[in-house]
Amino acid sequence: MMNRFAQRLTHAVGLFLVLPLMGCATYQSKVQPAREALARHDFTKALADLKPLADKENDDQLAYLMDYGVALQVAGQLKESNQILMKADRLAELVDYQSVSRIAGSLALNEEMVQYKGDTFEKIFINAYLAMNFLEMDQLDDALVEARRINEKYLKYRADEKQAFELNSFSKYLSAVIWEASRSYDDAYIAYAEAYKIDPSISTIREDLIRSAKLARRMDSYKDWKKKFPDVVESDSWYDRSNGELVIIYQQGWGPRKSAGKNNGHTLPTLVPVRSQTQRARLYLSSQTEPLLSREVYDVQSAAMKTLEEDYGILFAKRMAGIATKAVLSDQIRQQNQALGDLAYIALLVADRADVRQWSFLPQTIQIIRVPLRAGTYKFRLEGVDYSNTSTGEGLDSRDVEIKAGQKKFVIWRSLK
């Protein structure tokens, strides 16, 4: 097998030597123009750049589909976003057979020769994004389907002994909110409790556990949480069935981006944080005398960095195997031609580069604002603020929202600078 690969490589060495391999477009360079267009709200260009990439069936398609799905959501094309994300969900779940020759090729050249399958927290995120779209379109039944799908994936990945940060606490938290919106209070409590197990630092989780336990009539659990969180002040509005609720799900900034690590010869990826000016969302509501600030429920950046850190052992082992493979292949060529074998080894080293594929359009954090309200029509607007709570100029223009008794109204907003 290795000899046949070496023979094919011999014929290709000349080509490797003349191609500017280090200048070849990476995944990140291909999507960067679309990211820049999206940041300046040029949605037409961003979508036009991403569509042909997402439509093409290749080893990178899953990553392009996920980014395209987010871009469509930001552009307000929610139905189209869900069509793309459903395609991504099906692709992510496929068990793909990687041929021996392709695996050998990835060792000899680079990791981008194998199909991108997505990280665990990304795969669960697909269903969270589908659910958010359905919620904003007031399609609660469809959002419930995604909540069940999130639970299925959660059970599968937990059985696979995935780390807590891989299990995507936001998706579990969102499923709890969806169950609560459908008045399935016991399911909501269970999901909130599971979200707490994954990440007890979720900013709203203490009141969520107390409220949902009481609504589910799990009075022993309710008393336990009240004792555990004595500083949580309950509100009668939580339990007033004549109230509705406005739920703002705010996606803040940009998650970290993969690049070739300078300290490992550019063959292993590293994650570089993206600075964001807008840090919080401030809600102005006609019924409130004071604006409300968003609260963080998920740190995407932290999950991505912990995932990559967890993968470093495997990635490093593959690169060591790759160096050995390059040496063996080059030596086989040297047996026929010393100079060509030396050149082959150089060409293989030049061809090697870090795999920088990822779901790169994810936000840095996800935050939430929840306001119980009497039934009626309200005016609201959102304003992005920086660390000092000073307006950054980003926001959602003033609009009306109708709140119905016993129902939740969802609004999704993303800041991009």
Image: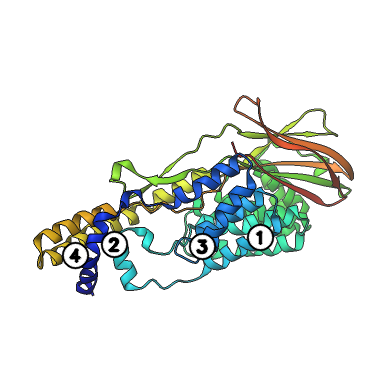
Q: Is residue 23 left or right of residue 389?
A: left
Instruction: Please report the residue visible at 70 percent of the width from the left and 42 percent of the height from the top.
Output: 207
Measure the C-alpha gap from mark 4 to mark 1. Answer: 46 Å
Amino acid at dot 4: Leu
Q: Is residue 195 left or right of residue 360?
A: right
Placement of the N terminus among the 4 image quadrants: bottom left
Query: Crowding near pointer 4: few (<14 within 10 Å), some, many (20+)?
Result: many
Do the numbered discs 4 and 3 sit on residues whose CB atoms are within 8 Å? no
> In the displayed structure, would residue 304 be above or below residue 324?
above
Q: CA distance from mark 1 to mark 3?
A: 23 Å
Amino acid type at mark 3: Tyr
* Mark number, residue 107: 2
Q: Is residue 273 left or right of residue 44?
A: left
Could you tell me how far apart the alpha carbons at marks 4 and 2 are, in whole angstroms? Answer: 11 Å
Marks 4 and 3: which is nearer the front? 4
**Residue under pointer 1:** 82
**First in sequence: mark 1 or mark 3?**
1
The three-letter amino acid code for the residue at tag 1 is Asn
Please give the residue where the numbered disc 4 appears in the rendered image. 329
**Mark 1 or mark 3: which is in front?**
1
Which circle's residue, 3 or 2, is located before the other in the chain? 2
Quadrant of the image for the C terminus? Answer: top right
Do tag 3 and tag 2 residues touch (Cβ < 8 Å)? no
Does 276 appear above or below 13?
A: above
Q: Residue at x 51, y 34 (%)?
A: 275
Q: Looking at the image, is mark 4 or mark 1 earlier in the sequence?
A: 1
